[in-house]
């Protein structure tokens, strides 16, 4: 099983560039957003050049072409994630909107009802649920940083209505056992919602195998454009939901003297003018993902991750947070004497892009008793040579701080 990373990365024009210091770009901030391959960029440009028009009810040729892009993308996504029906795919701006939409459907919950979250959740999977009246219960992590299944079992009860959890953690890279979690949630009569923000770039998704009721994700985490994503939801639940946004395109009838008659799913949840250019890019993203040899890519990622662990462990000033080979390609660490932002700034001067801070996961930071981390996140286009430059940059930190 082999993966030619150099051929793969040639598809990403930005990776041949330099940063403002004139250093070749080494991009380790993929959990925040990944770079776009030429084919996705070209798909969006092609759409703008050939069929830039609004969707829904367009009689003219451009409108029909745009509508074809729009609805064919829905079909391709449904196939890619193994949805039961095409109508179970709803376009949105990304994971955050998907989670807010779902929370908006449960405003009737009371303090007697419970929602279970994991300590490692991103703020986008915490804040929407806190606006509801329901009681939030938090599952702890194990000593190794994994989802604590025993704690989950203790907190799961007949009062549990929703279990909402990230598939892949954005700080530690923890890959949560979604099929087991969904099975246990359903046994308790609860729904299972999956924050899939980090999922698409990790490998193929099968929502039926996961067993979840809802799954939402963002294109820009998997070689796609920003501002576009989708929500998968089981049709039997979506049919009971009310529109989150109100506007054009979601109604069969509007009158001043009677209630609106909303369209069937998924149209009733896609008000206003959608990001059709982003959807054209998203379609090409799925085609791109389908061509990837994921076992070979994951083997490549494991090799890079193993070398990064070696480099970090050899530096006595570094503490890796919950290191494990069971993680996705996301590694967080702290420098014992240098603030994460300063580490990131020094890395940037060496051409290395990383993320520093609390990563929108302040409850996790509190549990770890820290204020923030430096986060390295890998993509298939990262190379061994780039990882070795990380070791060089780490060695420079004390000298740079001393002004040498």
Image (cartoon, helix red, strand yellow):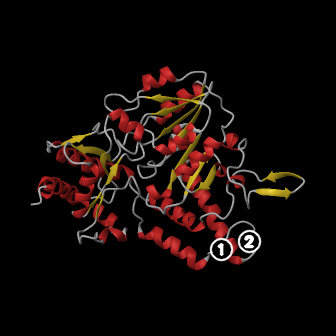
> Residue at the location (47% across, 29% down)?
138
Vertical placement of 58 versus 307: above or below? below
Q: Quadrant of residue 66?
A: bottom right
Asked if residue 6 lies left or right of residue 233, the reply is left
In this rendering, does residue 296 appear at all? no
Q: Which is more toward the observer, 17 or 381?
A: 17
> Residue at the location (43% across, 60% down)?
223
The residue carrying mark 1 is: 53
Q: Dot 2, crowdedness within 10 Å: few (<14), some or many (≥20)?
A: some
The residue positioned farthest toward the bottom in the image shown: 49
Secondary structure of the residue carrying numbered label 1? loop
Q: Where does residue 333 sit, x and y in percent of width and height?
A: 26, 44
Q: Where does residue 297 sit, x and y in percent of width and height?
A: 34, 53
Q: Dot 1, crowdedness within 10 Å: few (<14), some or many (≥20)?
A: some
| Label 1–label 2 contact, CB within 8 A | yes
Q: Which is more toward the observer, 134 or 378?
A: 134
Q: Where does residue 36 sit, x and y in percent of width and height?
A: 42, 65
Asked if residue 377 lies left or right of residue 22, the reply is right
Vertical placement of 317 versus 17: above or below? above
Asked if residue 16 lies left or right of residue 55, the reply is left
Which mark identifies residue 323? none
The residue carrying mark 2 is: 58
> Residue at the location (82% across, 52% down)?
261
Q: Which is more toward the observer, 18 or 282?
A: 18
First in residue order: circle 1 vs circle 2:
1
Q: Quick one: quadrant of the C terminus?
A: bottom left
């Amino acid at each position: 099983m082999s993966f030619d990373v150099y051929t793969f990365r040639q598809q990403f024009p930005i990776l041949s560039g330099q940063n403002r210091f004139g250093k070749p770009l080494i991009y380790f901030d993929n959990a925040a957003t990944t770079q776009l391959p030429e084919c996705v960029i070209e798909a969006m440009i092609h759409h703008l050049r050939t069929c830039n028009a609004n969707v829904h009810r367009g009689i003219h040729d451009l409108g029909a072409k745009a509508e074809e892009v729009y609805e064919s993308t829905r079909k391709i996504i449904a196939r890619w994630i193994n949805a039961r029906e095409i109508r179970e795919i709803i376009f949105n701006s990304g994971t955050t909107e998907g989670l807010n939409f779902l929370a908006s459907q449960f405003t009737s919950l009371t303090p007697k009802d419970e929602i279970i979250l994991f300590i490692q959740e991103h703020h986008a999977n915490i804040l929407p649920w806190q606006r509801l009246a329901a009681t939030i219960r938090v599952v702890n992590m194990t000593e190794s940083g994994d989802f604590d299944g025993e704690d989950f079992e203790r907190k799961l009860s007949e009062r549990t209505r929703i279990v909402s959890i990230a598939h892949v953690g954005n700080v530690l890279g923890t890959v949560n056992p979604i099929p087991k979690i969904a099975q246990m949630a359903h046994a308790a009569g609860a729904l299972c919602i999956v924050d899939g923000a980090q999922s698409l770039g990790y490998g193929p998704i099968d929502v039926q195998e996961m067993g979840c009721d809802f799954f939402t994700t963002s294109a820009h985490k998997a070689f796609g454009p920003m501002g576009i994503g989708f929500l998968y939801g089981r049709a039997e639940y979506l049919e009971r939901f009310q529109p989150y946004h109100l506007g054009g395109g979601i109604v069969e009838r509007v009158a001043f003297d009677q209630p609106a008659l909303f369209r069937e799913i998924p149209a009733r949840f896609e008000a206003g003018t959608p990001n059709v250019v982003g959807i054209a890019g998203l379609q090409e993203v799925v085609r791109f993902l389908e061509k990837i040899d994921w076992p070979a890519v994951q083997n490549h990622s494991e090799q890079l991750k193993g070398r990064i662990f070696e480099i970090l462990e050899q530096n006595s000033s570094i503490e890796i947070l919950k290191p494990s080979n069971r993680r996705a390609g996301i590694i967080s660490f702290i420098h014992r004497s240098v603030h994460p932002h300063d580490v990131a700034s020094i890395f940037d001067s060496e051409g290395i892009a990383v993320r520093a801070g609390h990563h929108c996961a302040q409850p996790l930071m509190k549990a770890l008793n820290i204020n923030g981390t430096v986060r390295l996140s890998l993509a298939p286009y990262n190379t061994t040579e780039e990882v070795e430059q990380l070791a060089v940059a780490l060695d420079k930190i004390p000298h740079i701080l001393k002004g040498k």
